Image (cartoon, grey):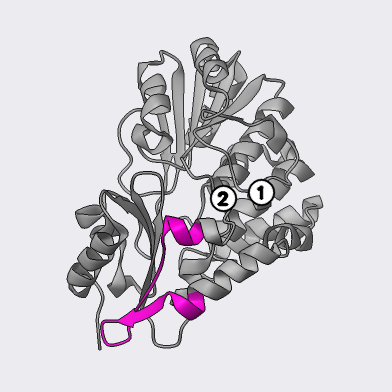
C-alpha cells in the first residue's frame, strides 16, 4: 500500500486525532495543521490542533484557526487531548523537541499511533508512519500529495485548499526558492480550479502591516543593518529593549532576514532577536554552495534547509553575533 493510502487509512481508523506542529508557528505549520483538520473532518473524524505556542496575528485569518489550542494557554486541555488520542499527526517537524520539551514528552510517552508528514532533513525515528521528503518545499505540498497519491483529491475543499496554498506560498518565499518544482505549480493550478482565491491569501499575509511594524522594519534596516565578509553577509539584530521601545508584538519581525538577503551581492543573512532567556536566530542564503543549515547545526543548536534555517544561542546577543562573524566564513563564500 502506498504511504499516502496508509495515512488516509490511519485517519479513517482513528477515533480521536491530535494534530501537532512546531514551535513559533509559520505559514506552513498553520496551513498544514488547518488542512489536516479539514481532511479529518471531511472523513468524519474528530480532531483537535495542539500547538506549543500561539501564531502571529497575520496567520490567524484562516477558517478554524480560532480552535487551535496552544500549550502556553491551554496546558491542561492539551494534556487531556494527548491522553485521549489514538492518532497523533506530526506536521512540519522532524523530531519531538521541535514542539517543546513539555509537548515533546507528551508525544514520546503517548501510546497513540503517530504519523509524520514533513520536509526537513534527517527525521528522527519516533513515528509509526513517516512521509518525509526534503526535496519538497513545504509540508502543505506533501499533504496535497497525500490526497493525490491516494487518489482522494475528491476530498479537497476550498478551506482545505486555501490552507495548503498558504503553506506552499510562505515556505517557498512566494514560489521563488529552488525547492519549487513543476509539480508544485501543477498543485497550485489544481487548488485554483477548486476555487481557492490565491489573491486573498497574499493580501491576508502581506497586506496587513501595522504602523508599529513598519516603523520597526524601518529602524531595523536603517539603524541595525550591518554588512560583513566582503559585503557578502548581512546582519540585523534587535535587543529586547529595542523591541519593547518599538511596541513589538509576535510576528512583527517576520521577513526581516529576507529583506537583508535581498541586498544586491549579499549571499547570506542572519537576524538575531533577543527573546526570553536566549537569542533566537534566523538564517537565509542563496545558492546550494552557501548552505546555512550545517552552520546552524554546528554552532547554533538548530537546523533546517540549506538556504533557510533557524537556531538559538544561550548568552548575550553580542556574543551570538561575535560567534557568527567568527564562523560564517567557513560556510559562505566571500568572492
Q: Quadrant of the C terminus?
A: bottom left
Up-down: is 260 above or below 55?
Answer: below
- Which is more toward the observer, 118 or 235? 235
Q: Residue 313 at x, y = what percent?
A: 28, 52
- Residue 228 lies within the magenta run: yes
CA neighbours of label 1 inside 10 A, class few (<14), some (14 to 19), many (20+): few
Q: Do the residues labelled 2 and 1 touch (CB within 8 Å)?
A: yes
Up-down: is 224 above or below 211?
Answer: below
The structure residue drawn at horizontal position 46% and vertical position 68%, both measured from the top left corner, is: 257
Q: Residue 301 at x, y = what percent?
A: 26, 49
Up-down: is 290 above or below 28?
Answer: below
- Residue 81 lies within the magenta run: no
Indicate the quadrant where residue 286 lies: bottom left
Up-down: is 149 above or below 112?
Answer: below
- Which is more toward the observer, 152 or 330? 330
The structure residue drawn at horizontal position 67% and vertical position 37%, both measured from the top left corner, is: 152
Question: Label 1, on which residue?
Answer: 57
Left or right: residue 143 compared with residue 104: right
The structure residue drawn at horizontal position 44% and vertical position 24%, both measured from the top left corner, is: 114
- Span colored in magenta: 221-243
Residue 330 seen anywhere in this rendered image of the structure: yes
Amino acid at each position: 500500500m502506498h504511504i499516502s493510502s496508509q495515512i488516509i487509512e490511519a485517519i479513517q481508523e482513528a477515533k480521536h486525532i491530535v494534530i501537532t506542529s512546531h514551535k513559533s508557528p509559520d505559514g506552513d505549520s498553520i496551513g498544514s495543521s488547518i488542512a489536516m483538520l479539514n481532511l479529518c473532518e471531511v472523513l468524519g473524524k474528530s480532531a483537535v490542533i495542539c500547538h506549543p505556542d500561539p501564531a502571529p496575528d497575520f496567520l490567524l485569518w484562516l477558517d478554524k484557526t480560532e480552535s487551535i489550542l496552544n500549550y502556553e494557554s491551554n496546558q491542561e486541555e492539551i494534556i487531556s487531548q494527548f491522553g485521549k488520542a489514538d492518532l497523533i499527526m506530526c506536521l512540519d517537524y522532524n523530531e519531538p523537541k521541535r514542539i517543546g520539551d513539555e509537548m515533546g514528552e507528551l508525544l514520546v510517552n503517548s501510546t497513540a499511533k503517530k504519523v509524520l508528514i514533513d520536509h526537513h532533513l534527517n527525521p528522527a525515528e519516533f513515528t509509526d508512519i513517516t512521509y518525509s521528503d526534503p526535496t519538497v518545499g513545504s509540508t502543505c505540498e506533501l499533504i496535497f500529495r497525500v490526497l493525490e497519491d491516494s487518489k482522494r483529491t475528491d476530498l479537497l475543499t476550498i478551506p482545505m485548499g486555501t490552507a495548503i496554498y498558504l503553506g506552499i506560498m510562505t515556505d517557498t518565499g512566494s514560489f521563488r526558492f529552488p525547492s519549487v518544482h513543476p509539480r508544485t505549480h501543477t498543485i497550485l493550478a489544481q487548488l485554483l480550479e477548486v476555487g481557492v482565491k490565491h489573491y486573498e491569501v497574499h493580501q491576508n499575509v502581506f497586506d496587513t502591516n501595522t504602523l508599529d511594524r513598519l516603523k520597526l522594519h524601518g529602524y531595523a534596516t536603517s539603524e541595525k543593518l550591518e554588512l560583513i565578509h566582503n559585503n557578502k553577509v548581512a546582519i540585523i539584530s534587535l535587543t529586547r529593549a529595542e523591541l519593547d521601545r518599538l511596541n513589538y508584538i509576535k510576528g512583527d519581525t517576520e521577513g526581516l532576514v529576507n529583506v537583508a538577503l535581498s541586498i544586491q551581492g549579499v549571499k547570506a543573512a542572519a537576524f538575531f532577536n533577543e527573546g526570553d532567556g536566549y537569542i533566537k536566530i534566523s538564517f537565509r542564503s542563496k545558492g546550494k554552495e552557501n548552505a546555512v543549515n550545517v552552520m546552524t547545526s554546528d554552532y547554533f543548536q538548530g537546523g533546517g534547509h540549506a538556504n533557510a534555517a533557524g537556531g538559538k544561542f544561550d548568552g548575550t546577543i553580542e556574543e551570538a553575533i561575535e560567534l557568527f562573524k567568527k564562523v560564517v566564513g567557513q560556510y559562505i563564500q566571500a568572492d
